[in-house]
């Protein structure tokens, strides 16, 4: 078996298991830790896809920023030791059907429609390439995203301030 | 380089001759590298703990460890390590066992993983990644998650408080740190650690100073060093483990081997940030070298490079320890103020000026500095005049 | 070489898990975590396409960067809202936050 295929299966299994714990885990802190694991698994998949800059950014922003924010929110909105309430609400059956339907639909579309592509043998070095793309072709979305982040920051501070 | 890569090549040829598949060979080499790094961290951490006690003692006009092992208590760290290993493993009742056990591992794994791209000597890097410095910064941000896990799972109010403060401090100081590190990256044109060291090998500033990036990027170096102190939770940014305030913060419930792992991770982190500062600002492993008799020039340069790297790193660690035992602790709000209101604007200014100079040449820099100087002079005089008018004093 | 369909099916699995979590979890923060899972799944498929399709500008990876940035902004605002909810209702259980239900 190709070594890349083996690594892919290991990473994919790890990520899906972690995602399962996020979705079904009783303890919310354990679900957050499992989310960290799934982010790291996805970062590993990016490295496998030769997107090393994106993998580093994924770890830096998602694990080093968003999960810390989530953990702060969990710590501020729950009590230590609590966690005996039900985790899943009444819509379990319906949402399981919806999720399964989505999965089968997407899987069918993928297996029917996507030809067996191989792509170029190696991508160009992604960091300078992405830098150039972001500052030339995608300069407008780049600036708009920075305005969005500013607006998000200001909005979050205003919403979370104690009056 | 001809020294260590040659060794790996000859080992590979040896393995091929014996018919060992490449995967096994690669895994064995990786295992050896990991073992070497862990060995280095353990020995270095033990040495640093002893050294810190000695430095703190001499700053405080006392002696420090003097007895264990004879000469100046050099075996004190070994004794401490044995003591921690032999202690009882206590997990507090009500603590989340899985997260409690996992937290020190996450912190140590994050600190250890950053050693992959440290350039110890010419050709001696575990893996010279394309995104070297970005990789180190992102892996270091994993340690904060471990700290929050440790604080939360201890089922202790002081732990949670310490963990939240530590996370807030680490995240706040990460931003100016990364922006300050962009200065040398722009000067070198690459994020690869090897390329950063090589870019500082050529040239000399003003003809006499070595071509290190600390001279044009002195502001970035200072910002990076301050942020590195905050990332390592060292005084003056000591609030998360303030011994006299929060009872040891997020690791108050940890004892024995688990506490030893946190301790080891902290000293490993100190070495990592010093190594980053050395590589990006102080020229990495560059230094004067001579060809030792009986060795090839490549190997001599390698050995001297290794020695110079260690000297520079330990010098920076010495400065960190010196600062710890000299300065007072910053309060939490002072800490956050300093990061967001002082360091971040300064690091952005450094980034803008560096970019400007790289695109438009040094004349623009001199012009900008001249204009800034005149403006600062004018503002200073105006403020002084207003202050005098307000208080009503007039000195002739 | 890993076939492209493997990555896309993995992305579909993660996305469906995220949808299931967003529809069934009661804790508001857990719903946000499921939304992050969905965004990650989409990113995986973008980056897989960037690798396997001939693209001149690595559009897949550029878009993935934008998705990460937007996810960060969205998390900040959403968690601020959750904190506001907690202050007013003393709970983050979305079943109990039903003042506007008729």
Image (cartoon, coloured by chain):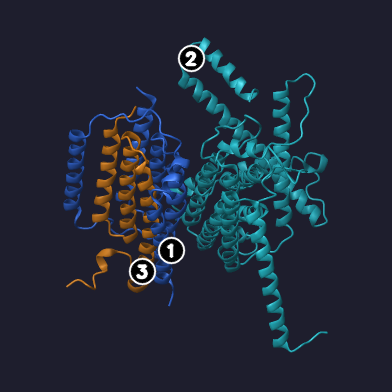
* Residue behind mark 1: A150
**Looking at the image, how many numbered discs can be counted on the residues?**
3
Tag nearer the camera, 1 or 3? 1
* Residue behind mark 3: C86
Circle 1 sits in a helix, a strand or a loop, which is it? helix
Chain letter, cyan: B
Chain letter, blue: A
Residue A102 in which image quadrant: top left
Determine whether B77 is above or below B330 in the image: above
User: Is residue B75 or residue C102 the one in the foreground?
Assistant: C102
Q: Is residue A131 left or right of residue A27?
A: right
Separation (CA) of disc 1 from disc 3? 25 Å
Q: Chain of mark 2?
A: B
- Callout 3: few (<14), some (14-19), or many (20+) C-alpha neighbours within 10 Å? some
Taking the view exactly as shown, the residue that stands out farthest to the bottom is B392
Determine whether C80 is above or below A133 in the image: below
Separation (CA) of disc 2 from disc 3? 61 Å
Separation (CA) of disc 1 from disc 2? 56 Å
Q: Position of residue C4 (x, y in %)?
A: 29, 33
């Amino acid at each position: 078996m190709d070594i890349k295929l083996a690594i892919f299966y290991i990473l994919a299994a790890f990520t899906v298991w972690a995602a399962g714990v996020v979705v079904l885990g009783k303890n919310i802190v354990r679900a957050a830790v499992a989310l960290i694991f799934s982010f790291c698994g996805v970062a590993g998949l990016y490295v496998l896809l030769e997107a090393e800059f994106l993998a580093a950014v994924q770890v830096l922003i998602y694990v080093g920023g968003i999960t810390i924010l989530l953990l702060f929110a969990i710590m501020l909105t729950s009590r230590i030791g609590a966690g005996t309430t039900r985790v899943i609400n009444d819509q379990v059956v319906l949402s399981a059907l919806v999720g399964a339907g989505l999965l089968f639909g997407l899987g069918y579309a993928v297996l029917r429609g996507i030809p067996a592509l191989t792509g170029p043998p190696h991508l160009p070095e992604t960091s300078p390439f992405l830098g150039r793309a972001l500052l030339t072709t995608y300069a407008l979305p780049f600036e708009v995203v920075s305005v969005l982040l500013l607006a998000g920051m200001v909005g979050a501070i205003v919403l979370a301030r104690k009056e | 380089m001809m020294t260590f890569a040659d060794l790996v090549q000859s080992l590979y040829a040896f393995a091929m001759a014996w018919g060992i598949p490449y995967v096994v060979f690669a895994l064995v080499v990786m295992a050896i590298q990991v073992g070497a790094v862990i060995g280095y961290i353990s020995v270095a951490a033990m040495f640093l703990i002893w050294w810190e006690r000695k430095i703190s003692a001499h700053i405080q006009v006392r002696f420090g460890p003097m007895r264990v092992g004879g000469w100046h208590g050099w075996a004190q760290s070994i004794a401490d390590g044995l003591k921690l290993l032999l202690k009882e493993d206590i997990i507090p009742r009500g603590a989340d066992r899985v997260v409690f056990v996992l937290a020190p591992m996450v912190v140590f794994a994050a600190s250890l993983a950053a050693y992959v791209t440290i350039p110890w000597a010419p050709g001696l890097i575990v893996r010279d990644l394309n995104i070297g410095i970005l990789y180190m910064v992102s892996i270091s941000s994993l340690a904060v998650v471990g700290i929050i896990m440790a604080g939360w799972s201890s089922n202790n109010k002081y732990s949670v408080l310490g963990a939240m403060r530590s996370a807030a401090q680490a995240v706040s100081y990460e931003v100016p740190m990364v922006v300050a590190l962009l200065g040398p990256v722009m000067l070198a044109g690459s994020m690869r650690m090897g390329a950063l060291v090589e870019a500082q090998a050529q040239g000399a500033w003003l003809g006499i100073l070595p071509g290190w990036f600390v001279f044009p990027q002195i502001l970035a170096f200072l910002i990076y060093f301050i942020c590195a102190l905050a990332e390592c939770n060292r005084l003056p940014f000591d609030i998360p483990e303030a011994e006299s305030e929060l009872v040891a913060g997020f690791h108050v419930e940890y004892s024995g081997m688990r506490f030893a792992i946190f301790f080891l991770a902290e000293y490993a982190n100190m070495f990592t940030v010093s190594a980053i500062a050395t590589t990006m600002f102080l020229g990495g492993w560059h230094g004067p070298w001579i060809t030792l008799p009986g060795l090839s020039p490549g190997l001599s340069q390698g050995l001297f490079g290794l020695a110079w790297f260690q000297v520079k790193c330990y010098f920076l660690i010495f400065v960190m320890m010196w600062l710890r035992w000299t300065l007072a602790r910053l309060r939490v709000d002072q800490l956050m103020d300093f990061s967001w209101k002082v360091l971040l604007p300064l690091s952005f200014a450094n980034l803008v000026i560096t970019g400007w100079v790289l695109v438009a040449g040094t004349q623009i820099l001199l012009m900008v500095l001249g204009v800034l100087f005149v403006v600062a002079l004018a503002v200073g005089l105006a403020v002084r005049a207003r202050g005098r008018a307000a208080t009503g004093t007039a000195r002739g | 070489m890993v076939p492209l369909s493997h990555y896309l099916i993995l992305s579909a699995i993660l996305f469906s898990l995220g949808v299931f979590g967003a529809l069934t979890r009661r804790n508001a923060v857990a719903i946000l975590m499921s939304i992050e899972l969905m965004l990650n799944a989409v990113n995986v498929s973008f980056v897989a396409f960037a690798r396997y399709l001939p693209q001149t500008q690595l559009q897949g990876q550029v878009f993935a960067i934008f998705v990460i940035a937007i996810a960060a902004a969205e998390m900040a605002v959403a968690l601020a809202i959750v904190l506001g909810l907690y202050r007013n209702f003393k709970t983050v259980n979305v079943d109990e936050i039903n003042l506007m239900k008729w």
